[in-house]
Amino acid sequence: MNDTWGEIYNQWTGNGWQGTGLLGNLGRDDADVGFASMATWTIYYDFLDFSKPSVRTGVTGLVPAPKLASRWLIPFYSYSKTMWLTVAILFFTCIIALFAIRYWTPARKNSEPLTNDMVNLLDSSVWSILKLFIVQPVSEWEIVQGFNGGLFMSLLFLASLFLSTTYSSGFSSIMTIPLYENPINTVMDFYESGLEWGATGTAWIESLRGAEDHVTKEIVRRFIAVSEEELHKLSFTYKFGFAMERLPNRNFAVGAYVANNVIGDYRVMVEDFYWEHCIFMLRKSSIFLPKFDAFLLRVFETGHINHWQSEAIMQYMDFEVQKIVEFYNYQHQVEHVVEKLTITHLEGAFAILIIGLISSTISFIIELFIYRYRQVHTLRLPLNKICSRYFIRRQN
């Protein structure tokens, strides 16, 4: 804690306020001015004075890069989960509606081979709706006679046309543009991911303390303050996020614990957790504050602050890491090598085909066993009768 921001305790002694780190030095009056990406932390305003703001800084997350979505699930990515649920509800609703229309319509077109048996009627309704949903033609006897039946079938044909068109369009876009699973771009994405994040000190979340919404509370709860060595080890797990600063002039404050050999597998969030104005802190009622503020404003007007910031980034931070982060943050796209369609692009379609073939084969084998079983039992009764008659004659 003595090497970082530290904190101030509400304990006054003859030497000043007790504390640790940079803040503790200011509280004890061991330092006149403190600056190290310090924001307007109101909790410390009772102990220290704040200067005019110098630069605007945003705190965001360096999170693991999203992975390509599973290719064999591509046929299901055309619709969202909500859309698939809507289609399923529509499917079962149409089955119930068609079953009801057929059940309460005594006169059916061309005397189709449907009986009043409830099971057969439900079975035919399921297959009729399934045909329409996969854009297959229905038989003439499956069309219900009457105004209500004609209106229902017309609307169903129209709905199946829209569904098939939208699905085909979505499937084409997915095959053209690579799809990634669960990218973390916004604060809500980070919240829903359940990812832990951290840095070398709790000052990164000082501005979030006291938040009322449950999203921010959960993000603060998942923050971990550990040493640089531990953070360096966590960078190789690709299951951890790191706090970082988004500075002006396309600069980033990335900790040395994220090396250039792993930074390529991380991405900067598009959205910031929060933003603040960096300030200087001085002892309470410091006589230096008015002149220091005037000097700070003059330096800001001349652009020296931005220049010094860029010089510090170049001198004390990994330049390669800076360029990689800047590339992924501002270019927003990666050049992909043009490749031919391979079997991996059609894994989903072949998976559905294989599942269908296996299911139909198993069903066919079961039907054969049932047929043989019934055939044996139907032949056994006449054979018993013949044998009994034969023995009766022999006895006579």
Image (cartoon, rainbow, N blue to C red):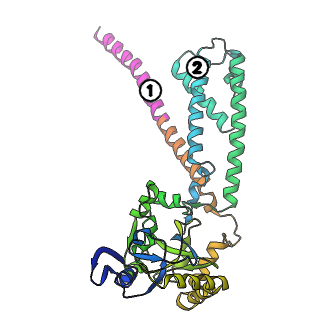
Which of disc 2 and disc 1 is earlier in sequence?
2
Mainly helix, strand or loop, the magenta region?
Answer: helix
Depicted 291 relative to depicted 160: above or below: below
Q: Is residue 379 magenta?
A: yes
Q: Which mark is residue 374?
A: 1
What's the amino acid at mark 2? Answer: Ala
Q: Where residue 61 appears, x then y in whole percent?
A: 51, 70
Depicted 116 relative to depicted 231: above or below: above
Magenta stretch, residue numbers: 367-396
Name the quadrant containing residue 8: bottom left
Spatial distance from mark 1 to mark 2, Cα to Cα? 33 Å
Q: Is residue 197 left or right of residue 263?
A: left
Mark 1 residue crowding within 10 angstroms, few (<14) / some (14–19) / many (20+):
few
In the image, 4 versus 313, the foreground residue is 4
At 50% across and 61% down in the image, what residue appears?
Answer: 190
Q: Is residue 277 magenta?
A: no
